[in-house]
Structure formats: C-alpha cells, structure tokens
Image (cartoon, rainbow, N blue to C red):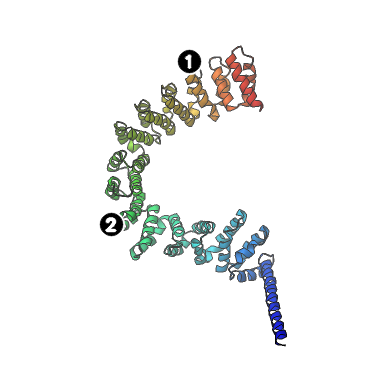
Amino acid sequence: MKVWLFRLLFGAAVLGVIGSAVWNNIATNRLIEQATGTDPAAQVQALQQMAQRDDFFDLIQSRRTPARLRVAEGVERLNSPDAVKIALAMLRDPEPKVRDRFLDALRKIGGNHLEALAEGLKNGDSKVKNGTIQVMSELGLKCLPVALKAFEDSGARDAAGEVLTRFGSASVPGLLKLLRNTQDEGLQLSAISVLGRIGDRRAVDAILPFLKLPPEKRRVVLTALASIADPRTESVLIKALRSPDEDPDARAQAALGLGQMATPGALRALRAGLEDPNLIVADACVSGFQRAGTKALGMLQDALQSQNAATRRRAVLALGVLNDAQAVVMLTRALNDPDATVRRTAADALGTTGHPNAIPALIAALAHPDGGVARNATRSLVKIGAPAIPALIIQLRSPNPTVAYFAAHALSQIPEAEPALLQAAENPATQRYALVALKERASYAAKPLFERAARSEDPVMRQIAESALQQLSQ
C-alpha cells in the first residue's frame, strides 16, 4: 500500500513538473509573439515583462529579422528605462540593419532616460559600447552630466572618456573638478589623458603638479601636455625630450608637442633630437618638424649638413611633407647626397611635396646613375600626376633608353596622360615609348595604333604591338 501511494505521489509530481514546464513554455511563446507582434498595446505590455528577464535578448533573437525590427517600434512606444535597456541589448544583433534600427530608437528615446542610456558605456560588447558613445555624442551636451558620472566608474571610464573628448571644451570644467576632488590615482590619470586629447589650455595648471609622479605614470602627464602644446610648457617638454630616463613614448609625444609649438627653442630641441640614439625618439622628431611646417626649414637645412647619414635622411623625410619651393631646392640637393639611402629618400620626398617645382629635378633624376634614385623619381612623378605629363612626354624621345622607359612607365600610371600618349604615338620621335606606355595601360583606345604598328618594319615596334594586341584580346 505504501509503495503504491509513493508511486502515485511521484507520478503526480512528475506530471506537475512537466505541466509547469509546458505551461511556462506556452506563456513564454505567447510573450515573444506579443513582443514581436503588431498589436501596439500588447507589444508594450509584453516588452515591459520581457525586460525583467535575463534571457530577453535570446528570446527576441529566436525570431526572424522582420519580427526583431518590429521590436524597435515597441521600444519607441514604451519609451522607458526598460525600453532603453532592450534597445541597448539589441545593438548586439548580428544583422546591421537591425542594429541601425535600434540606434535610431535610442536617438529618439535615449535623451529621456539618460542614466539608462549611460549603462551602455560599461557593456562588455564593443557594438553596444560604441553605439552608446555614438548616440550620446549625437544627443549632445545634455549627456555631459551622466558622462562625467560614468567616467568615475572604472568599468565605463574608457567609453565615457570618448564621449567627453567628443564634447571638447565643454567637458573641461567637470574634468578639472574631478581632478581636484578625487584621490583615485587611476581616475586622475584618466582625467589628465582626456584633458590632453581635448587640448584645452585651461587644463595646464591643473596637470603640471602631476609631473612628480613616477616615470611609468608621468608618461600620461607628458603626453597630455604635449597634446595641449601650450608654449608655457616648452621647457617641460624640452626637458622630457632630452632625458634618456623618461619613457621613450613620452619623449616621442614631447617631440610632437614641441613641433606643434614651433618656437625657436622647440625647433632647436627637435634638431638635437634627430641625432637621438633612441629610434622612437629620433623618428618622432621628424614628425615634430612636419607639424612645425615651413618654420622648420632653417633647422632642417642645418640637419642636412650633419655628418650622420641617418640624421640627413630624417631631415629629408621631414621636408617631404612641405609643399614649399625652398623645401624642393633642399631636397634637390639631397639627390646627390653621398649616402644612397638619403638620395633615394630624397627622390621619394620630392614627389610627396606635390610641388610642381619638383618636376625638373625629378625628370633629371630619371638619368641618375643610382638606379634606386631613378626608380623613386619615376614613382614621385606619378604622385605629382597631371602637371608632370608634358615634361614626361618630352622624355619619350630621350636618346637614353632607360630614361625613355622610366618616362613611359610613369605616364602609364597617370590617368590623365592617355590623350597625350595617343598623340605621342603618332609622332615617330616618341612613338615607340608612347606605345610602351599605352601597352602598360592596356589602352583599348590605342588598339588601331597597335594594329598599325604590328605591320611596322621595325621588329621592336612589331613586338610591342603584337604583345599589346594579345593582351587586349584576353
């Protein structure tokens, strides 16, 4: 009897569990159907319930794309912190159009529930975090207080810092207040970093005391000061640049800041830095000079006289970004530097300037005895492009076949050169290398010229033409 009763009770319990599971499954399916359905009132009520479940994202993901898109409409109708929570989670959706639709929903309702929106800044998923940054940035300065609050949370700090950086100078007072009031060193350094990225000079006085930190932390401070580039910090950055005890990356940042200042003292420090044994620092001085622009010409002229070939090469690299006639003159002289690397770098740099005054020097360099210089000059003429076409066309008749070929090779890569090449292919003096260039371009417009040249008595011309026609027929 007891056995029979036990079995009866056990069976009832099993049936109860099964029944409960079935009922819960039915209820869950009904909830999902309502949340993704077309009945506005039912959808809002269902989404309110779903937001309390940890598995709501997975439940919505079980439906097709159109149904998931309908959830965004319900989120906009619900317009509550729970709605923001759902929309943030849906930024993880694998479908870009679904993510974009929920970004739109957040733009519409996020401004009404900023604290809920800011929760996305601490989300571990990069799509959620980046979407939150984007929406908060677009909503504007009304998000500033919650972004500052989120910045105090280490889990949201990086993303909140990005929002504050985008708000620019408006973020500075709040960040300075944080810097004054907190004893959290991590928060202090993060605030200094963001202030540096914003670049507002109001932050300088608040940042300077933190130079007393150890070198591994002082690099954050020096980087911030370098980014702000206030002339008041010139001596600080010069000292950092010259100090081998500082972190190399911090010294490199100091070089960039000095280049932004471009004061006489800063430029002298960069000139000395070109000789630094640490390559990271020396190369950063090149970037510093590039930031300084034409103010750097005098110091770069001095650097070109250095006994150190690496220093001369760095000076050439710095000159290459200056679209300036004097820089072209200096680079032209460097084409005959005793060091091959310097010469070849100068040939490249002349093209990087983009200055039309570089064209004669580069044309002459096509005949340079250093083949590397000639090849780099060819590449530079391509960079300059259309302005170089007339001078290159003339070189197609050069008695030096190497020069003529380099000219043809350059013309083949300049899109605007085709009409001039077609005309040059009609001229016996320039025909051969004009056809070479047209062949390299795979020019269909030149097909009649290739067909005519294929009947030429000149075997070289026939070979060029036949090869071109075969290429065009493939």
Residue farthest bottom in this picture: 1
| Residue under the image location 56 percent in, 16 percent down | 427
Q: Which mark is residue 212?
A: 2
Q: Is residue 134 left or right of residue 218?
A: right
Q: Is residue 176 above or below residue 299?
A: below
Quadrant placement of the C terminus: top right
Circle 2 SS class: helix
Q: Residue 389: x and y, percent?
A: 50, 25
Q: Which mark is residue 399?
A: 1
Q: Is residue 362 above or below residue 272?
A: above
Q: Residue 119: x and y, percent?
A: 50, 64
Amino acid type indicated by mark 1: Pro
Residue 73 seen in the current view: no
Residue 217 seen in the current view: yes
Amino acid type indicated by mark 2: Lys
Q: Residues within 10 Å of mark 2 (few under 14, many from 20)?
A: few
- Front-most of residues 136 and 186: 186
Circle 1 SS class: loop
Q: Quadrant of residue 3?
A: bottom right
Quadrant placement of the N terminus: bottom right
Q: Is residue 112 left or right of residue 338?
A: right
Q: Residues within 10 Å of mark 1 (few under 14, many from 20)?
A: few
| Residue under the image location 66 percent in, 58 percent down | 65
Q: Is residue 276 above or below residue 414?
A: below
Q: Residue 210: x and y, percent?
A: 30, 57
**Cα gap from disc 2 to disc 1, whole angstroms:** 68 Å
In terms of sequence position, does the residue under pointer 2 or pointer 1 come before the other?
2
